[in-house]
Amino acid sequence: MMKPWRILVAMAGLMGAAGVALAAKAAHDPDASRLATASTMLLFHACALLGTIALAERGVVHRRIGLITAIGFVLGAALFAGDLLMRQFTGDRLFPFAAPIGGSLQIASWLALAVCALWPRRA
């Protein structure tokens, strides 16, 4: 496994841990809708990240597009969840349109995964 993939696996672990921690915090906070949403996005996309890495490493999907997809999952989740967390804990945004940009990046990554599954592999 190449170094970029290992870094992405580590990022998936961090996203999963953060997602569980946020879910625990949300369970004890009366106003926790943002925390619950951030937790869900981090947990789902940590799993998507691991799946994308596994598929790309095995050659099931196009490797380069798979790498771009995996990076998109990380950046999209970070922007989306990061903006929700900033609003929850400080009342401010990460930056204007951070959550929509992150969400759009996640959607684009899912579409890229579909493309790289259909893209022919080089022999």
Image (cartoon, grey):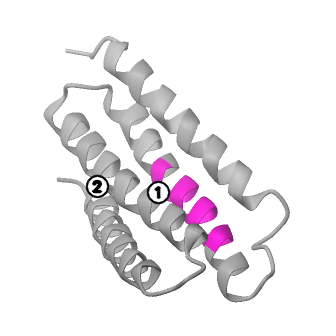
Left or right for 41, reference 51: right
Give the answer, above or below, for where 67 lies relative to 115: below
Give the amino acid type for the residue marked by disc 1 in the picture: Met
Considering the numbered disc 2 on the image, is that residue within a helix, a strand or a loop?
Answer: helix
Disc nearer the start of the sequence (2/1): 2
Is label 2 or label 1 in front?
1
**Where is residue 67 shown, x and y percent of the image?**
39, 43
**Where is residue 78 shown, x and y percent of the image?**
55, 65
Q: Which one is nearer the viewer's eye here, 81 or 69?
A: 81
In magenta segment, residue 30: no
Main SS category, magenta section: helix
Left or right for 112, reference 61: right
Given the current orientation, which residue lies at the most extreme front position?
Answer: 30
Q: Which residues are magenta?
A: 73-84
Please identify the quarter of the rendering in which residue 113 is found: top left
- Residue pictured at 21% horizontal, 35% vertical: 55
**Where is residue 116 shown, x and y percent of the image?**
38, 23
Residue topped by disc 2: 5
Residue topped by disc 1: 41
Give the amino acid type for the residue marked by disc 2 in the picture: Trp
Q: Which one is nearer the viewer's eye here, 15 or 59?
A: 15
Considering the numbered disc 1 on the image, is that residue within a helix, a strand or a loop?
Answer: helix
- Residue pictured at 31% horizontal, 68% vertical: 16
